[in-house]
Amino acid sequence: MPLTISTPSPIWVGSSSGLEKLDLDYFYDHDSLKTTLYNDFNGFFGTECNQNATTVDTDGNYWFGTISGAVKYLPANDLSDSKIPLIEVSRINKRGKFTDWKKLGYDLNEKGLPIDVQLAYNENSIQIEFIGVSLLDPASLEYSFLLAGADEDWSDYQKGHSVFYSNLTPGEYSFHVRSKSINSGLTSETAAYSFSINPSFYQTLWFRIASISLLAIGISWFFYWRVRSIRIHEAEQRDFQHQLAELEMTALRSQMNPHFLFNSLNSVNNFIIKNKKEEASEYLTKFSRLVRMVLQNSQEKLVTLENELTALRLYIQMECLRFKDDFNFIEKVSPKIDLRKYFLPPDIQPPTTGPSFQKSASNMDFRDRR
């Protein structure tokens, strides 16, 4: 690669692609490299330069020796360094297809572009075409673009004249594009175009607020219903326990007949008045055993037949003591019956046996109560 340095600037680099000028003054002032490429497109027809075949004449013109002959460069006539390229957005297409915006009811600006484009949420694909202008070297232009609202940074420079965006979310967008000459390094001003994509009803703010509100109401109602159900259940449990306690008390009262208690206490009192200590002690012993058995059996749903017969036996013995042995009773139980294998509700016999004794005693002659 032939290299020729002129003082103080620029640096000329020749290659098989043409002749490239490097501006040192621009580099020192801006800390970036500015280059200009000369080839068949902008008047350099030498194609490939010869090594060390460079000179400057007295008028400040450069002469380069190439494989095709000598080429003269006139710096005063070079306009490539001073002309900044232009750029503009040329067309907008929905879904990448030609779109007649006027038929869709849109007004057009002086460049023929639709004004205030608002796309539906299901029309969220758009193609944007653009074109750069450089009269001296149009083939050297490259483009970089940015879609504010979707892109975070500018794209790399490329040769394409259009860009396609698909599946854009609802919102406001602003497209920016710029061109750059790869020969001069000059960059155009930025061209911009704005448009928007409308959300569907379920993507709108009011729908989201309404949905969140309904969800909050639903959750609140669920917790209210749940707490209310628990409280109702607890109240029902309390009522059930209360009814059960009342039933237990009723059962206990039925097992301990108040007439029987009254008569038993009177009998004890009578024995004490008549100084019959042994009879009073025996009666109290049987009475306490009977009361204890009744209270113990009341805690069970079922008791053995053996326990129930023991309670009945104590009751009859007490009645016999109270009526001065005017009653005799015979207890017959088959030895084949295992009294501990059979169960029945507790204290069935005493509440029913008591009235039987009372009725029998009132219908019989006092002297013959057997």
Image (cartoon, rainbow, N blue to C red):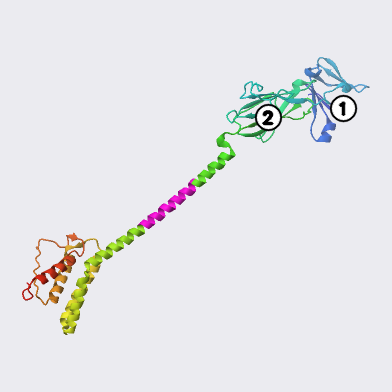
Q: Is residue 184 above or below residue 251?
A: above
Q: Residue at x 12, y 76 (%)?
A: 323
Give the residue type that dot 1 points to. Answer: Ser
Q: Nearer the viewer, mark 1 or mark 2?
A: 2
Toward which corner of the image does residue 146 lie, by quadrant?
A: top right
Mark 2: secondary structure = loop
Q: Position of residue 16 (x, y in %)?
A: 76, 20
Q: Which of these two is toward me, 121 or 157?
A: 121
- What is the span of residues highlighted in magenta in the rendered image? 218-236
Residue lying furthest top in this view?
68
Point out the tag, 1 or 2, that comes first from the N-terminus: 1
Assess whether residue 87 is covered by the magenta stretch: no
Toward which corner of the image does residue 297 lie, by quadrant?
A: bottom left
The 10 Å Cα crowd at callout 2, few under 14, some 14 to 19, many 20 or more, is few
Image side of residue 102 versus residue 17, left or right: left
What residue is disc 2 on? 116
Toward which corner of the image does residue 301 lie, by quadrant?
A: bottom left
Residue 36 seen by the camera: yes
The 10 Å Cα crowd at callout 1, few under 14, some 14 to 19, many 20 or more, is few
Q: Position of residue 131 (x, y in %)?
A: 72, 23
What residue is disc 1 on? 6
Q: Which of these two is toward me, 153 or 322?
A: 322
Q: Residue at x 35, y 57 (%)?
A: 237
> What distance separates the C-alpha of mark 1 from that of mark 2?
54 Å
Residue lying furthest left in this view?
368
Q: Which of these two is toward me, 59 or 204?
A: 204
Give the residue type that dot 2 points to. Answer: Asp
Image side of residue 230 versus residue 309, left or right: right
